[in-house]
Image (spheres, grey):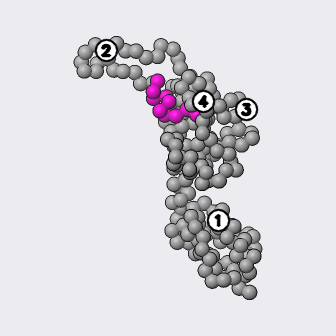
Amino acid sequence: MTAPAVTVAPDTSLEQTIRLLDEHQITAMPVVDAAGHLLGVVSEADVLRDSVLADRRVHERLVEITGRTVHLVVTDVMTHLPIHVSQDDDVAQAVELLVSSQVKSLPVVSDSGVVGVVSRRDVIAVLARQDVLIEAEIDDQLRRAGVECTVDVDEGVVELRDAESPDSLRIARVIASRIPGVIGLSTGAAARA
C-alpha cells in the first residue's frame, strides 16, 4: 500500500480536490473526518461529473448551459459507502476487490483511521520486483532469523533447498512467503538430517 494516504475532508472544495488528485497523480482519495476515520471516497469520475460544463459553442448554435450554480464540496459528490480493506487483510482479498469491482484503489483502515491506500498499481509494482531483489531480501531475513538455507528465485517463484532441518525449512517457507513479489514456493532437496 501507499502510506500515508492523501486524504481530504468532506468540506474540501472540488477545485482543491482536483488539484490534489493531479498533484499526487492518483485516481481517488479517502474522505476522512477530523479523527482520520473513513467517511467515503472521492474519485476522478466523481469530480469530473460535476466539474465540466457543456460548451455553448457545440454544433455552432446557442445552447443553454445548465450546471452547478452553487459551490460544490467533496461531500456533494463522494461515494458515501466505499469499499475498503483492513490493514490486517490478506493482499489476495484486496486484489479480488480491485479486480471484481470498478475501483482502482482501496482505502486501508485500522481502528485509528485510514492508514493508507492500496491500488492496482501498488500490487503490480510488488509483482514486478526483480528476482535478485526478492532473493536478497529473503537471504537477509533468513540470516536475521538464524536459518541456513539456499535460496533461488526464478520469475517470483522461490526455491528453498539444503536447509539444516525440517524445522528450518518450515521457518524459511514462512519467511519467504511474506516477502513482496513472491508468487510461489518450491522446495528442492530435502532438509539435511
Q: Nearer the viewer, mark 3 or mark 2?
A: 2
Provide the residue designation for mark 4: 80
Residue at point 62%, 26% (across, down): 10
Label 4 Cα crowd, 10 Å radius (few <14 / some 14-19 / many 20+): some
Magenta stretch holds residue 37:
no
User: Is residue 121 visible in the rendered structure shown here?
Assistant: yes
Residue at position x 34%, y 12% in the image: 64
Contact (CB < 8 A) between labels 4 and 1? no
In-image side of 116 versus 171 (left or right):
left
Q: In this view, does 19 lie above or below 86?
A: above
Element at label 4: loop
Question: Is 112 left, or right, of 57 in this rendering?
Answer: right
According to the picture, the residue beneath numbered tag 2 turns out to be 63
* Label located before the other in sequence (2 or 1): 2
Q: Which of marks 4 and 3 is nearer the N terminus?
A: 3
Upstream in the sequence, badge 3 or badge 2?
3
Q: Which of 15 and 69 is in front in this view?
A: 69
Query: Which span of residues is magenta-colored?
Result: 41-50
Residue 177's disc is 1
Residue displayed at 56% across by 51% down = 95
| Mark positioned earlier in the residue sequence (2 or 4) | 2
| The image quarter in which residue 188 lies | bottom right
Question: Is the magenta region chiefly helix, strand or loop?
Answer: helix
Give the image quarter of residue 145: bottom right
For the residues marked 2 and 1, what is the alpha-carbon distance in whole angstroms? 61 Å
Nearer to the camera, 133 or 126: 126
Q: Circle 3 sits on which residue?
A: 35
| Identity of the residue furthest to the left in this view | 60
Q: Is residue 68 above or below residue 133?
A: above
